[in-house]
Amino acid sequence: MEVVYINRNPQCGYSIHKVFANMIPYLLNKINVFSIDVVGLSGSVRDVLNNIKQVRNIANLHPNAIFHITGDVHYITLALWDRKTIVTVHDIGRIKNISCVKRFFYWILRVLPLQFASRIVFISKFAEQEVCHYIPLSRNKISIIPDSVSDNYRFVEKYFNQDNPTILHIGTRPHKNLSRTIEALSTIRCHLRIIGKISRNDLYLLEKYGINYYNAYDLSENDLLEEYKNADIINFPSLHEGFGMPIIEAQAMGRIVITSDISPMREVAGNGACLCDPYSVESIRSVYCNVLKDKIYRDDIISKGLKNVMQYRSEIVARKYLDLYNRLYEN
């Protein structure tokens, strides 16, 4: 069996590549895997047509392959109308926050093409519900397979600095909820490490509340791994996610993660995270106070997190995809 991964251009973000790169070593002794990045960066007519043409040429070289569109470039199904295709859907949350005209083109490129896929994989039940709100899909086509955590993320013991904890916050787009985090930490002595470019408003809040912080962006995978190792707490009170990778990365490292008591974060975290109301500064602050004062509570959460993350290990997720490939191949 041959499976060809079709990935978005890496310059659009490497997170999706990372998820599937984690699994490939567990697939290679069972199937032949090829991985292709599309050349076009944007959703412009020119880039879309170039990407469709590129993939069609690739399809001609692999006449019997299953083509797996790993995310984002869902419209590639149009180039593969006569082939067996799988699309993994990570998130379409952006559709809610764009103008009507852009929303229409987003729907054309990201939502409508799912109708033409042989199988559709959602990384969470929440992601499935979001998409099915906009378009009806056959239940027979749908599978739920979570993202996998890299094998590089393993338990590393660390002394917890209760008096001045290092808090890691990943992502600075508005839905990552940095503003409320800053306000919540205004009365808590800590060192906040922010990964991502900080907005003017958040810079103002950091200065206003006198937060001790460090900022970095465009980190390598190894640099990000070091940030996890050195952190006491991973802060992830996001307002919207398709999945929430930092939750399971934190759990795999044996770190306390504070995340949102909303879907899909609470389902992904299982019992291995401290949950807060992401819209309430007081709720976020209260959870931090509980974490900082109660060692027994911290140890229990970390233990449950290490147990929860086992289901997201690359080998386990690879088996689920292999089963899907086999079933599609035999049809």
Image (tube, rainbow, N blue to C red):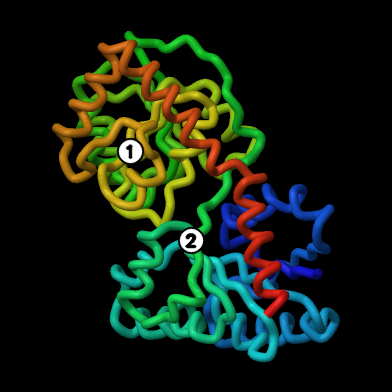
* In this rendering, the label closer to the viewer, 2 or 1: 2
Q: Residue furthest bottom?
A: 82
Where is the C terminus found, in terms of image quarters? bottom right
Query: Is the residue marked by circle 1 packed among few (<14), some (14-19), or many (20+) residues within 10 Å?
Result: many
- Disc 2 target residue: 144
Along the horizontal axis of the image, is 69 left or right of 275? right
Q: Secondary structure at mark 2?
A: strand
Q: Earlier in the sequence, mark 2 or mark 1?
A: 2
Residue 75 visible from this viewpoint:
yes
* Separation (CA) of disc 2 from disc 1: 22 Å
Q: With respect to residue 125, does 306 lie above or below?
A: above
In the image, residue 180 lies at what x, y percent?
A: 23, 39
Q: Secondary structure at mark 1?
A: strand
Please tell me which residue is depicted at 31% across the width and 31% down the height of the picture: 274
- Disc 1 target residue: 259
In the image, residue 263 lies at what x, y percent?
A: 31, 52
